[in-house]
Image (spheres, helix red, strand yellow):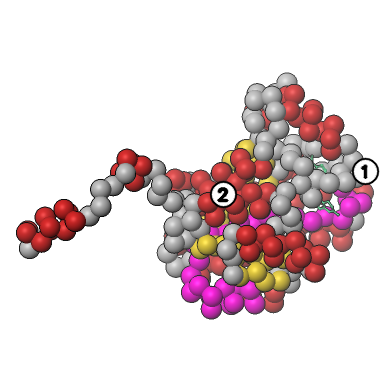
Amino acid sequence: MKGNEITAERTESPKTKQEMSGANMKMLEGKKGIIFGVANDHSLAWACAQALHNQGAQLAFTYQGEVLERRVKPLAESVGSTFVEPCDLSKDDNIEAVFAKLKKHWQSIDFIVHAVAFANKQDLEGHFVDTTRDGFKLALDVSAYTLTAVAKAAAPLMTEGGSIVTLTYYGAEKVIPNYNVMGVAKAALEASVRYLAADLGDKNIRVNAISAGPVRTLAAMGIAGFRDMLKYVADKTPLKRNIQADEVGKTALYFISDLSSGVTGEVIHVDCGYSIMGM
Ligand code: IMJ
C-alpha cells in the first residue's frame, strides 16, 4: 500500500504555484440557488448573479411578465443557466410551482437572492401621510412579505443548510424624501430578516440583508431628482463616491459563501459609509 501511494505521488503532474495556494479554487463550486428580481443588466440582482457565477455557483432565475422575460432569458443564458421560469411572487401558487420545478431540477438548493420591491408610482412622490390602504398593502406584500413566502417554500429544499440574502435601503431607518411607503416596507423586510433568521437557524439556514446605497437601476429610474440624490450622497460618504453594483454582488458572495458562516439576521450597509455620518 505504502509503495502504491509513493508511485501515485510521483506520476501526478506538478502543481503550479497558483494551484498550491488555492488561488483558483472557486468558493461556490457545486452550490445551487435561485435569484428573484433581475430586471436588466443594471439590476443589483444581476450584479449578485455575476459574482456568484464567477465563483462557480449554478443559478436559476425567475421573471414576471413578457417584457422581463425578454430581458432575463439572454442574461440567464450568458451565465449558463438552464432554469428560467415565470413567477409572480404576489401569488402563492406561483411560488409553490417554481419551487416544485426547482426540486425536480436540482433536488436541493443552497441559496436565494431576493431583490424584489414594488410600490405604486404615486406612493413614491408627495407625502407618506397620503398613502392609501391599498398602496400600503401592495408595497408591504411585494416588498416585504415575499421574503417570508420564498423562505418558507425554500427551507425544505435547503437540506444542507442555506443562505438567504435580500436587498434593503437606508430609507428603512431614516426618512428619505419620496421613499415613503417603501421605507415602511423595507423596515418590515429588515425585521423579517431577523425573525426568519431566528426561525431557520436550527436548519443552518442563514438570512441576511444588504442595505445598498443608491445606484442607477430600473428601480431608481424616474424617481424625481435621483441624479441630484446620487451627487448629494457621494459628497457626504466617507469614501466620497457612490457604490458600484459589483460591490453589492461581492457582499452577496460573502453572505452566500462560507466566509459568513457565523453571521445571520444581519443588515450590512454597502453604502460607502453614508449611514455612519451624523452631519
Ligand atoms: C425610490 C424612491 C424614492 C427615493 C429613492 C428610491 N432612493 C432610492 C430609491 C433614494 C435609492 C430606489 N430604491 C432603494 C427602491 O427601493 C426602489 C423601489 C421601487 C421603485 C419603483 C419605481 C417604479 C414603480 N414602482 C417602484 N416601486 C419600488 O412604479
For marks 2 and 1, give the one nearer the viewer: 2
Judge whether 89 appears above or below 238 on screen.
Answer: below
153 with respect to 29 (left or right): right
Residue 202 highlighted magenta (yes or no): no
Q: Position of residue 17 (x, y in %)?
A: 32, 40
User: Residue drawn 67% across and 38% down?
Assistant: 244
**At x 69% / y 77%, what residue is drawn?**
93
Q: Residue at x 83, y 55 (%)?
A: 119
The crowd level at tag 1 (other Cα within 10 Å; few <14, some 14-19, many 20+) is few
Tag 2: Cα neighbours inside 10 Å, few (<14), some, or many (≥20)? many
Q: Which residues are magenta?
A: 97-124
Residue 13 visible somewhere in the drawing: yes
Q: Mark on residue 51?
A: 2
Say which mark, if any, is on residue 126: 1
| Cα–Cα span, label 2 and label 1 | 37 Å
Q: Quadrant of residue 242?
A: top right
Q: Amino acid at mark 2?
A: Ala
Q: Is residue 99 magenta?
A: yes
Mark 2: C-beta under 8 Å from nearest atom of ligand 1: no
Q: Amino acid at mark 1?
A: Gly
Rendered position, 132 above or below 245: below
Hey, which quadrant is residue 272 in on the image? top right
Asked if residue 39 is positioned above or below residue 24 in the image, the reply reads: below
Q: Is residue 200 left or right of residue 219?
A: left
Task: Specify the quadrant that holds the C terminus.
Answer: top right
Q: Is residue 89 visible?
A: no
Judging depth in this view, the residue of 224 and 126 nearest the camera is: 224
Residue at the spot 59% in from the left edge and 70% down from the top edge? 82
User: How far across and how far down the image is residue 120, in percent?
Assistant: 87, 56
